[in-house]
Image (cartoon, helix red, strand yellow):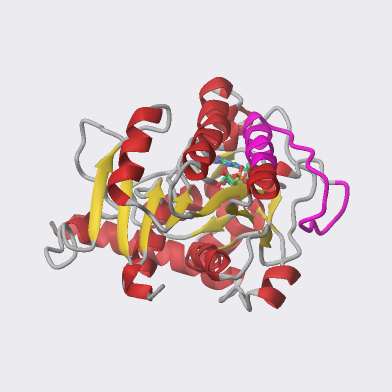
Amino acid sequence: MKENEKAALITGIGGQDGSYLTELLLEKNYTVHGMVRRTSNLLRSRIEHLRRDEKIYGQRFFLHYGDLSDGTTLRRIFRNVRPTELYHLAGQSHVGLSFEIPESTCEEAGMATLRLLEIARDQPAPVRFYHASSSEIFGNATETPQTEKTPMLPTSPYGCAKAFATQLARVYRQSYGLFVCNGILYNHESPRRGENFVTRKIARGVARIARGLDVDLVLGNLESRRDWGRAQDYVRAMWLMLQHKAADDYIVATGETHSVREFVEAAFAIVDLPWEKYVKRDPSFDRPTEPANLVGCADKIRRVLEWKPTGTFPQLVREMVEAELAAIEIKSGQ
Ligand code: G4F
């Protein structure tokens, strides 16, 4: 198949990963279809620049109303779009929140994936299916770093739902020969990260304090450690998985961990302010349980797909803080 005949369908297109993936696929000459939920606010900030581009929107980029719980509409979208590649990224993805809304989290992260696997299985022409799995499936991991073979031991409702969906994807691959890949992604960040995830919350808070718009930054557990990479690199990994001759599962990670405290220190250093003066601790942001030691071994994807992460931890922190400072400047100039 020629590259320009490729049609991708993306669930969760309005999120951080969906927006970077859309840009990547458009660059590669795909036709990109995104599924969006109906909301009262028509503005979808991360993809608005593409929606306003008349050369792209309605030509090679389309949005369709749909909902992960609505199987009839999902099937109709498939029939109209006839995707050659499906990137399933949608669903409630905040781990802390999954303790408060476990049923809807499991419905979206678990059952909806099963629904899509069933639809993909029924398609007349083969569809390559990317499932956004997560390091949260490992939870209290039995080994460090984790590999594709590490047993799943999730510690949150979100992790349980992702473990269910990850294993189902494997079952559909083995049982029906479906081309489905689990991307087991560790935390990946960017200026487009949602504001309630810790890196964006810190970057935004630091910029607002530096410009006199806030007086403090209230956080949960500063000692938590994560393997943080760049979202732009991680969407490239998703695409690479679906271009390979065989479907498989891959860990996508940097192999390096840092604490929330280290992120805070690096972010405040950029604006030359003492973090201890501004950071307040609020245990209400703590989770009932935290994964033990999540750090990924990405040897397999490095070897098989020749993927590697770019940039360093300090560069990531700087990119995020500078983006927030620039956003404040643009707003104040309006
Ligand atoms: O930024 P976080 O909310 O990300 P978390 O829980 O690691 O999950 C993210 O990465 C997973 C792996 O890729 C994804 F599966 C998942 O969908 C999501 O994208 O929290 C990171 C750490 C946690 O240990 C949390 O307890 O930061 C700690 N933290 C400390 N203070 C905070 C805060 N987290 C948030 N969200 N807000 C705080 O104020």
What is the x, y in percent for residue 270?
49, 68
In terms of depth relative to the viewer, which is nearer, 189 or 108? 108
Residue 28 visible from this viewpoint:
no
Q: Residue at x 32, y 35 (%)?
A: 66
Q: Residue at x 19, y 65 (%)?
A: 56
The residue that appears at 66% across and 39% down in the rendered structure is: 168
Q: Is residue 326 left or right of residue 146?
A: left
Q: Is residue 289 visible?
A: yes
Give whichever of 284, 18 is nearer the camera: 18
Q: Position of residue 174 (x, y in %)?
A: 70, 48
Q: Residue at x 76, y 56 (%)?
A: 148
Magenta region, residue range: 142-168
Position of 139 relative to 229 (above/below): above
**Residue 99 appears at what percent x and percent y?**
61, 25
For the C terminus, the image quarter is: bottom left
* Residue 206 relative to residue 250: left or right: left
Q: How many dots with numbers?
A: 0
Q: Is residue 143 magenta?
A: yes
* Residue 133 falls left or right of residue 273: right
Where in the figure is residue 49, as x and y percent of width and height?
Answer: 21, 60
